[in-house]
Image: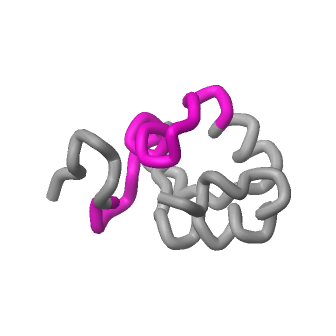
Amino acid sequence: MTSSSDGSQPPGRLLTKRELAEFLQRTPRTLDNYVRQGMPYIPCGGGKRFDLPSVLDWLRTREDDEPEALAS
């Protein structure tokens, strides 16, 4: 399953950091900062994968910091 190029439809699978950054319209470096702050991820072969519903729930707890991330 692939995501649309405009990022409007989330894929129904674990996302790579690049895919999640594109979907949230953030840089991969910002996602690294989020991980250090506690954003959930799944270790996978030396990298990280992200479950979109879990990430969005985490962002909702930070709604004051990232309200535009929830508009997608």
- Residue at image coords 38%, 42%: 19
Foreground residue among 15 and 72 = 72
Residue 61 is a magenta residue: no
- Residue at image coords 29%, 42%: 6
Q: Compared with residue 60, is residue 24 higher up or lower down, i.e. above or below? A: above
Asked whether, in this view, residue 67 is left or right of residue 69, the answer is right
Residue 71: x and y, percent?
54, 61
Q: Compared with residue 7, is residue 22 higher up or lower down, i.e. above or below? A: above
Q: Compared with residue 16, is residue 38 higher up or lower down, i.e. above or below? A: below
- Residue at image coords 38%, 59%: 14
Q: Residue furthest toward the left?
A: 1
Residue 46: x and y, percent?
49, 38
* Coloration of the structure image: one colour
Q: Where does the N terminus fall, quadrant-wise? A: bottom left
- Residue at image coords 47%, 58%: 72
Foreground residue among 35 and 43 = 35
Asked whether, in this view, residue 65 is left or right of residue 52, the answer is right
Foreground residue among 6 and 39 = 6
Magenta range: 10-30
Residue 27: x and y, percent?
57, 29
Residue 22 is a magenta residue: yes
Foreground residue among 46 and 10 = 10
Residue 49: x and y, percent?
46, 51
